[in-house]
Amino acid sequence: MNAYIRFKLALTENEPTIKPYDEAAWAETADVRDTPIEVSLTLLDNLHKRWVVLLKSMSDADFAKQFRHPELGVVPLEKNLALYAWHGNHHAAHITSLRERKQWQ
């Protein structure tokens, strides 16, 4: 959700400064711990549907727009999209590896 919001900010503001967050701390809140995984998967699926519509509507000039990350500096949306594509694959590899180690079907 933060990635999507960062895209929207960069598309609608001139080089906005985004706020980093502590991902580990976010993962420990009650809405994460106490909600069935299906709720999160549905949320993620619908978020991705919206993001795809947004991405398909973007021009080359839109992908050149950027935001400012307090730790990373200026980040163009084109680079950010590549980072999130890698990030998603990285998470999927963690899940696949865990499934194999636990021998889940």
Image (spheres, helix red, strand yellow):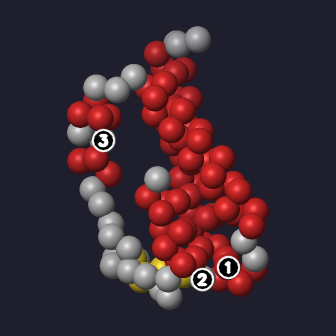
Q: Is residue 104 above or below residue 68?
A: above
Residue 53 in percent (x, y) is at 71, 57
Mark 3 lies on a secondary structure that is loop
Disc assigned to residue 73? none
Q: Is residue 30 left or right of residue 37?
A: left
Residue 59 in percent (x, y) is at 75, 77
* Residue, far bottom: 14
Q: What's the distance in space between the residues labelled 3 and 1, CA to CA?
A: 31 Å
- Which residue sits at x=28%, y=26%? 34
Q: Is residue 17 above or below residue 25?
A: below
Q: Is residue 83 left or right of residue 78?
A: left
Q: Is residue 98 visible?
A: no
Asked if disc 2 and disc 1 are in contact, CB closer than 8 Å, the reply is: yes
Mark 2 lies on a secondary structure that is loop
- Tell me which label, 3 or 1, sits earlier in the chain: 3
Tag 2: amino acid: Lys
Tag 3: amino acid: Ala
Disc assigned to residue 65? 2
Residue at mark 3: 27
Disc assigned to residue 62? 1
